[in-house]
Amino acid sequence: MSFIWFLIIGGIIGWLAGMILGKDIPGGIIGNIIAGIIGAWIGGMLLGSWGPKISDFYIIPAFIGAIILVFILSLIMKSMRKGS
C-alpha cells in the first residue's frame, strides 16, 4: 500500500509543479509521477529532509525540486523545438 501512496503523492507533486509554472509535463500522468519522484530526489539533495512528510516524501523540498525539474525540462523542450 505504501508504494501506491508513493506513486500518488509523486504524481500530485509533479502535477502541482507543472500547474505552478504553467508548463505541460510530457507523458501525462506517468510524466507527473516521474517528475514528482525525481523532483523529490533533487529537492532532497539540495534542501535536505525537513517539513511535513507523506509516504517517504518531504513535501516542501520535493515540491521545490519538482519545480526545478519541470523548469529545466521546459527549457530543454523549448530549445529542441527551436532547433527543428
Image (cartoon, rainbow, N blue to C red):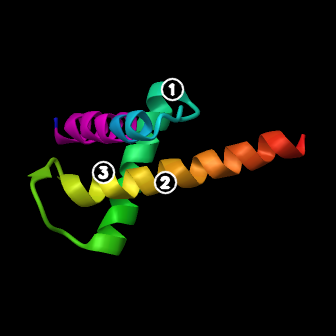
Q: Residue furthest left?
A: 52
Decide: few, some or many residues near mark 2? Use Cα within 10 Å; few <14, some 14-19, many ≥20: many
> Which quarter of the picture shows residue 60?
bottom left
> Which quarter of the picture shows residue 78?
top right
- Magenta part of the chain: 2-15
In this image, 54 relative to 70: left or right? left
In this image, 45 relative to 29: left or right? left
Q: Secondary structure at mark 1?
A: helix
Query: Mark 1 belongs to which amino acid?
Result: Gly
In this image, 46 relative to 31: left or right? left
Residue in the picture at 20% in, 52% down: 59
Residue in the picture at 90% in, 40% down: 84
Position in image of residue 75 (x %, y %): 65, 51
Decide: few, some or many residues near mark 1? Use Cα within 10 Å; few <14, some 14-19, many ≥20: few
Q: Is residue 6 magenta?
A: yes
Q: Secondary structure at mark 2?
A: helix
Position in image of residue 10 (x %, y %): 32, 41
Q: Main secondary structure of the magenta part?
A: helix
Question: Marks 2 and 3, Cα distance to the nearest angstrom?
Answer: 10 Å
Query: Mark 2 belongs to which amino acid?
Result: Leu
Query: Mark 3 belongs to which amino acid?
Result: Phe
Q: Is residue 44 magenta?
A: no
The circle drawn on residue 63 is: 3
The circle drawn on residue 69 is: 2
